[in-house]
Image (tube, grey):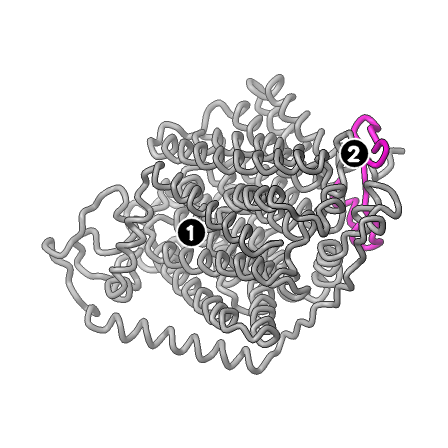
């Protein structure tokens, strides 16, 4: 009987083997293609789930040296896999997303050609992200990032007959390669200083030994991983890629690819460099997270395409995760991990609903949709569950994790006395209100209202596409209602692993290694999470009422206005960044429920339109400038 110690490697190698078998047997045989796909992702799911008891419940950390190349004279010379509670938490998200996406794709992709090659790339993407979360070697992490990036680029371009798919893939290729280059440069500098690539050994050697070289490497790697997480200002390829890729791939981008970047940032900041205790590190990440939240949701409000709107919301929700992780508290990291998990569930569900609409009707243009609730009732119910979850309405999971994030930021504001965190608390609540407003717009545009002629033939999607939606809908409810069990079984062990690295180091490098470098455990207190907090409830009520008043007052002078050709904007390629681009009989069209509000914010949206120019040189400059800011900040404030 094979020991569970081998399960992580078998899961990763099994997925890559499945990709190889798809190329041999799946190119011309549909049954073989689908069988290999589901069997591969299903086995990986079972293998990773089998680790929950020994790792999550019993607290074991699993180490596995490839080829049995164990450390020699205190130095790691081989590639090691190390699975602690933090890595397993993200691995569970990966295998769940992979399995559900593979089932959904069976019927969704049947109208496309070259599916054998598609599933080769599909499984390469799954294997790379899973390997990234399980590896204990920083260069092996880079290899997985490279496989992930190029598989994602090819999958973005898969429907190349659509011109924007090739453009989106090219943007992803350029910016993804820049992120990989930053990461590799940082790894090279770390190797120059420490002469090792093992994460556990790096964590021990960098403790109290931050030189200018290692700080510079830190900045480069943090930039590269932020590109993979699509944090603003590194987010620009995400919206195009999510919209252009087949929906089962968009679900994977949102559910696990950006989580790979988030995992990398947390592993880097909490474990390898242990810099999260530095106030400057917390402020830097909190600002990036808050800006990501706000820009993502405002850009989503202005979209006219279902999938593109979801893409910007995905960026916005990652802002919550980064902001909470930036706090450096157990409650903050618990909220970050909880929201990362919930984002995988509700955003994956919403993308599947968008894919179902596209499969049934043939478009995701909000102005060409409507009245689908009667023709696709099951999809409508699933969508509403996802919309309620992402908007933070109780008792769905989004409310529980957002409420945990609100409490964590508010507690940090009180503890530190820093006004910045009080401001970020308000921003987080406002973003949640704007998210709800955005999904009111989508609900009205897609599922309710009048049914246009183009949607007259719509019908419910096949069973194999509905099953993943049912599963994710159920999980959105279950994880919201039983949040205490989620916190006890999954969040608390993962948070403890992030704060207490001595066991992580000693398992990989030998007992006593951490103590030899002067590293001791930090007692990670249990997250003090209360579902009922009167102060925050009052803040939430005040902010919601204020936001509602702003919408009513600022849009009053435009209410009932009839658009004229003279007032219409040019209907160009990037006109979807703000409203009023076509002459319509009323300003309340499917995608313009809040036209008056957006009109009065037109100066802001013009700035956003100019920033999102669609020019790859501009986006590359954003990456360079963002990386320079991060590196300079760390150089000045991190010692």
**Residue at left 56%, top 19%?**
27
Q: Is residue 41 visible?
A: no
Query: Height in image: 43 above or below 23?
Result: below
Between residues 265 and 196, which one lies in front from this camera angle? 196
Q: Is residue 118 magenta?
A: no
Work out which quarter of the rendered image holds the C terminus and state it: bottom right
Left or right of 468 on screen, residue 524: right
What count of labels does the image hold?
A: 2
Magenta highlight range? 47-74
Work out which quarter of the rendered image holds the N terminus and state it: top right
Foreground tag (2 vs 1): 2
**Residue at left 75%, top 43%?**
200
Helix, strand or loop status at disc 1? helix
**Would you name the residue on which mark 2 appears?**
76
Quarter of the view holding residue 192: top right
Residue 556 percent across, percent down from the top left: 23, 73
Residue 309 percent across, percent down from the top left: 39, 51
Residue 228 percent across, percent down from the top left: 53, 42
Q: Is residue 66 magenta?
A: yes
Please report whichever mark, 2 or 1, sits nearer to the chain's N-terminal start. 2
Could you say which disc has been placed on residue 312 in the image? 1
């Amino acid at each position: 009987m094979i020991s569970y110690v081998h399960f992580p490697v078998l899961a990763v190698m099994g997925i890559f083997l499945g990709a190889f078998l798809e190329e041999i047997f799946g190119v011309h045989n549909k049954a073989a293609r689908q069988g290999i796909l589901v069997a591969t992702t299903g086995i990986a799911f079972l293998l990773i789930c089998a680790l929950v008891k020994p790792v999550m419940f019993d607290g074991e950390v699993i180490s596995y040296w490839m080829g049995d190349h164990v450390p020699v004279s205190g130095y790691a010379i081989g590639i090691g896999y190390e699975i602690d509670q933090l890595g397993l938490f993200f691995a569970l998200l990966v295998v769940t997303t992979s399995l559900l996406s593979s089932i959904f794709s069976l019927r969704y992709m049947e109208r496309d050609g070259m599916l054998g090659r598609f599933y080769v790339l599909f499984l390469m993407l799954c294997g790379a992200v899973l390997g990234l979360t399980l590896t204990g070697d920083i260069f092996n992490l880079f290899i997985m990032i490279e496989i992930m990036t190029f598989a994602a680029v090819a999958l973005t371009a898969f429907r190349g007959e659509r011109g924007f798919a090739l453009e989106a893939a090219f943007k992803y290729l350029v910016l993804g390669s820049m992120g990989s280059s930053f990461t590799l440069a940082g790894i090279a500098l770390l190797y120059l200083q420490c002469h090792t690539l093992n994460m556990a050994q790096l964590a021990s050697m960098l403790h109290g030994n931050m030189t200018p070289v290692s700080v510079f490497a830190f900045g480069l790697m943090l930039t590269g991983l932020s590109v993979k997480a699509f944090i603003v200002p590194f987010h620009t390829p995400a919206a195009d890629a999510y919209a252009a890729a087949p929906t089962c791939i968009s679900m994977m981008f949102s559910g696990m690819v950006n989580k790979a970047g988030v995992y990398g940032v947390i592993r880097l900041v909490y474990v390898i460099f242990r810099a999260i205790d530095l106030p400057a590190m917390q402020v830097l990440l909190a600002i990036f997270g808050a800006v990501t939240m706000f820009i993502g949701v405002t850009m989503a409000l202005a979209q006219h395409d279902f999938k593109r709107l979801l893409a910007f919301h995905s960026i916005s929700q990652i802002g919550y995760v980064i902001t909470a992780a930036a706090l450096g508290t157990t409650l903050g990291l618990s909220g970050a991990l909880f929201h990362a998990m919930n984002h995988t569930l509700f955003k994956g569900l919403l993308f599947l609903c968008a894919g179902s609409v596209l499969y049934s009707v043939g478009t995701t243009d909000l102005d060409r949709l409507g009245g689908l609730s009667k023709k696709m009732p099951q999809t409508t119910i699933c969508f509403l569950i996802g919309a309620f979850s992402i908007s933070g309405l109780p008792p769905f999971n989004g409310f529980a994790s957002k409420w945990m994030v609100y409490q964590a930021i508010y507690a940090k504001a009180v503890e530190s006395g820093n006004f910045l965190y009080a401001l970020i608390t308000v921003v987080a609540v406002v973003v949640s209100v704007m998210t709800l407003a955005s999904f009111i717009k989508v609900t009205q545009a897609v599922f309710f209202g009048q049914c246009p002629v183009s949607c007259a033939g719509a019908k419910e999607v096949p069973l194999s596409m509905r099953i993943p939606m049912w599963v994710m809908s159920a999980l959105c409810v279950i994880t919201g209602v039983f949040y205490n069990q989620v916190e006890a079984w999954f969040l608390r062990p993962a948070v403890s692993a992030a704060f207490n690295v001595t066991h992580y180091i000693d398992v990989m490098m030998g007992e006593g290694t951490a103590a030899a470098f002067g590293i001791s455990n930090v007692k990670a207190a249990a997250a003090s999470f209360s579902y009922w907090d009167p102060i925050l409830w009052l803040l939430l009520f005040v902010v919601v009422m204020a936001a509602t008043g702003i919408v009513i007052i600022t849009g009053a002078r435009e209410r009932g206005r009839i658009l004229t050709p003279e007032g219409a904007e040019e209907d160009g390629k990037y006109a979807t960044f703000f409203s009023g681009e076509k002459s319509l009989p009323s300003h309340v069209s499917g995608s313009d429920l809040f036209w008056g509000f957006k009109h009065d914010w037109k100066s802001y949206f013009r700035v956003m339109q100019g920033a999102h120019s669609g020019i790859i040189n501009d986006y590359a400059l954003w990456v360079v400038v963002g990386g320079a800011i991060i590196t300079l900040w760390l150089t000045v404030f991190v010692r």
